[in-house]
Amino acid sequence: MGIPTRSTPNLNENARKVLERRYLRRDDQGRVLETPEQLFERVAEVIAAAEERLGTGQSVTEWTERFYSMMAALEFLPNSPTLMNAGRDLGQLAACFVLPVGDSLEEIFEAVKQAALIHKSGGGTGFSFSRLRPRSSRVRTTKGVSSGPISFMTVFDAATDTIKQGGTRRGANMGILRVDHPDILDFIACKEQGDRLNNFNISVAVTEEFMRAVREGGEYGLIAPHTGERIGSLPARDVFWKLVEGAWRNGDPGVVFLDRMNRDNPTPDIGEYESTNPCGEQPLLPFESCNLGSINVSRFVRPTTREVDWERLGECVEGAVRFLDNVITQNNYPLPQIQEITERNRKIGLGLMGFADFLILRGIPYDAPEALEEAESLMGFLQKRSKEASAKLAEERGPFASFAQSRWASLGYPPLRNATTTTVAPTGTISIIAGCSSGIEPLFGICLWRNVMDHDRLVEVHPIFKARALEEGFYSETLMRKIAEGVPLSRLPEVPREIADLFVSAHELRPEHHVRMQAAFQKHTDNAVSKTINFPQRATREDVADAFLLAHELGCKGITVYRDGSRDWQVLNLGVEGEGETPELSPIPLYGGCELSRLWAEGGD
């Protein structure tokens, strides 16, 4: 491996603003002490130093240059804690954690303390509150009654509110409750007013038994977690519709398909999944952590031929897997329990960003059937090459400790270094740094306002669209203002039809296509896929129900929906400085073969 020429990152203005606000080192007076180039150097040096610690015989210098080159070229970026903390006092490099919450007061408040340490270090936490006894249950030691899971969630929420993650961002939590917990209806409604638990995303962990009861009709059992006894039942469709109502109202709760997640658990002998990280894409065992990284796939399309440079992409995958495995070795873990199980399973989550840009450069509209084929092909390639890279690392460094008892061994895989290799994350701020579209999401708009970091607002105009508009002679400031005000390209006669079709935005897509896109990526992803199923404001509850049912039907591991304007504040906005309304679009067609939802809404069976 030759040493690449040291390159200077080509960062746009928004990328530099985000780096300066959140990532670059500062002195005690808040003055910035490093450049973006020095940030990438700092991270590359720390991660490459694992080669010496592991005794691999590899050149630390050469891998430092390789890692720097991948980041500076904006081809690959690790999760935010790695960029922030590598080579600094905290030294905590992972983004995703799951902590167990036991049923005793001591266990609950120990989890609060552990979460505080993780938030301080820059990580996000997921919890299942399913072990807590339901409200009004007897507490033997005090002869009193339990206040239930939701009351204790408010304690976690208040603790999170007081802690800034590494001085850069507030803590984020995922709260999960099993659908068969007796307090499930209280949980579904706990964020109904939008004025509590604002540091939590919440999701209901639904089982296959529940989904069968939803489709077939009938009741399902409620289980008291502290006794294991069935203490009642609920009509499955009634609970399902309450889920739908909450998601339609403000996006909470989401749904995770718990049995499906555990079906793909690579180490079932060690434990079961019960929760995920805050954005839902990373199921983890209790105390487990995972570090993520994303490849900017738009950088691997040849501009003249629109072909994918598969060879160069494969080399990037191999380098990224090595980088992420090195992170596990270099990490300064906030708790010894986390270090033990993380180093035992060595899970990494390599994903992608810039997928919408990738499709545009390939000349494929996001809503075309070919886009789904591209998704499967691209993620299948990342999955295959990441497994090959992990197997190669296992030859060099040894497999993860639990490999012999893992699902991979039973399926006949060669020894692997990592229990998982792939995750599709939302890539919020790292996609801003990379100057590309977020994760696997479609473009939110061609010109939009993005709210970041304590409601700062950054204006964004899609660079490829501007280049095409200038090239084809239809660019004007008047036209750009119309687009910024939220007028769809399809309604602007100045914009050629081919361009309007190619630059389709999230709210011009049928929700069915959002779900099918998520499912296409999930087919070749070890962990889960972060994808927001966007709905226009006029969408109905029945539309949301259809999306939930279709996600289950197609093999997704969870689903999060968001109806535009259903919260007072949202990250991305169309309209003048985010104050305009999303324009009225064509009606949403019924889709996915899930017409049961409309029948139920009318009171039928």
Image (cartoon, helix red, strand yellow):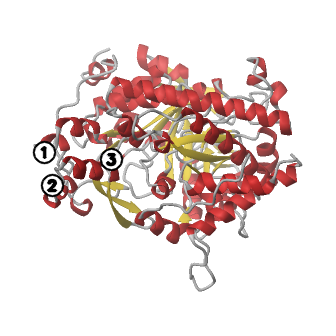
For badge 1, the amino acid type reads: Leu
- Earlier sequence position, callout 1 versus callout 3: 3
The spot of residue 191 in percent (x, y) is 42, 49
The spot of residue 308 in percent (x, y) is 48, 34
Q: What is the crowding at mark 1: few (fewer than 14 residues within 10 Å), some, or many (at least 20)?
A: some
Q: Is residue 207 visible?
A: yes
Instruction: Say if 12 sits above or below 257 in the image.
Output: below
Q: Where on the picture, by quarter, is residue 460?
A: bottom left
Point 43% across, 67% down: residue: 454
Q: Where on the picture, by quarter, is residue 160?
A: bottom right
Label at residue 444:
3
Callout 1 secondary element: loop
The residues bearing labels 3 and 2 have C-alpha atoms spaced at a distance of 18 Å
Q: What is the crowding at mark 3: few (fewer than 14 residues within 10 Å), some, or many (at least 20)?
A: many
Where does label 2 land, which residue?
A: 479
Instruction: Say if 120 sits above or below 108 in the image.
Output: below
Q: What is the crowding at mark 2: few (fewer than 14 residues within 10 Å), some, or many (at least 20)?
A: some
Position of 66 compared to 366: left or right? Answer: right
The spot of residue 578 in percent (x, y) is 26, 60
Q: Quadrant of the N terminus?
A: top right
Q: Is residue 399 visible?
A: no
Q: Nearer the viewer, mark 3 or mark 2?
A: 2
Position of 114 compared to 362: left or right? Answer: right
Point 37% across, 24% down: residue: 370
Circles 2 and 1: CB atoms closer than 8 Å: yes
Circles 3 and 2: CB atoms closer than 8 Å: no
The spot of residue 318 in percent (x, y) is 67, 39
Where does label 1 land, which residue?
A: 492
Position of 340 compared to 185: left or right? Answer: right
